[in-house]
Image (spheres, rainbow, N blue to C red):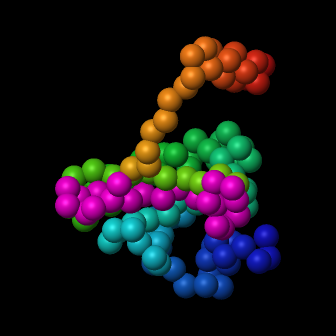
Amino acid sequence: MDDCIFCKILKGEIPSSKIYEDEFTIAFLDIMPVNKGHALVIPKGHYETLLDIPEKELCAWIKTVQKVSGAVMKATGAGGFNLGMNNFKVSGQLVPHAHMHIIPRFGDDGLKHWGQGNYEEEEMKGFEEKIKESLK
């Protein structure tokens, strides 16, 4: 896609701090990291969300996420990491090209998880049924 910033990075039109590349994927450092070492892994094909990535490329992509996650932890001395992916604008996706964030975590980094809710009585059963039906 011509105006996609990640496609421009793939074409070399925008510089990046590339840390990994293979036939289907590329990983580079986020220019606005949550923590130092925060990386992004993208498929080389232009797919807007997780739902759009063909199976072969999806498998390659998640393998790269696994490989780069281990390298980020080792290189940064992190005690753990978070994976994050926003799909569609309403979820906070800013770049319409599928990408996984790898965020190294440290015991004192101050990051917080989002709050949790609950279901009303019998509400969970309704969502269970709707989701199962949608899988057919």
Nearest the eye: 3 or 106:
106
* Residue 33 image offset from top left, x and y in percent: 41, 72
Number of labels in the image equals 0
Say if the magenta span includes residue 104: yes
* Residue 59 image offset from top left, x and y in percent: 58, 41
State which region is magenta.
Answer: 89-112
Judged left or right of residue 62, residue 92 is right
**Residue, x 42% and y 57% (percent of image)?**
102
Give the position of the C terminus as an image quadrant: top right
Say if the magenta span includes residue 57: no
Nearest the eye: 103 or 26:
103
**Residue, x 62% and y 60% (percent of image)?**
92
Residue 68, by quadrant, is: bottom left
Judged left or right of residue 104, residue 124 is right
Q: Is any atom of residue 24 visible in this view?
A: no
Tell me if residue 57 comes above or below residue 5 in the rendering.
above
Give the position of the N terminus as an image quadrant: bottom right
Judged left or right of residue 65, residue 98 is right
Q: Is any atom of residue 40 visible in this view?
A: yes
Nearest the eye: 108 or 15:
108
Specify the farthest residue to the front: 120
* Residue 119 image offset from top left, x and y in percent: 55, 25
Tell me if residue 96 comes above or below residue 88 in the rendering.
below
**Residue, x 76% and y 18% (percent of image)?**
133
Nearest the eye: 16 or 97:
97
Residue 26, by quadrant, is: bottom right
Dominant secondary structure (helix, strand or loop) of the stretch shown in magenta: loop
* Residue 35 image offset from top left, x and y in percent: 34, 68
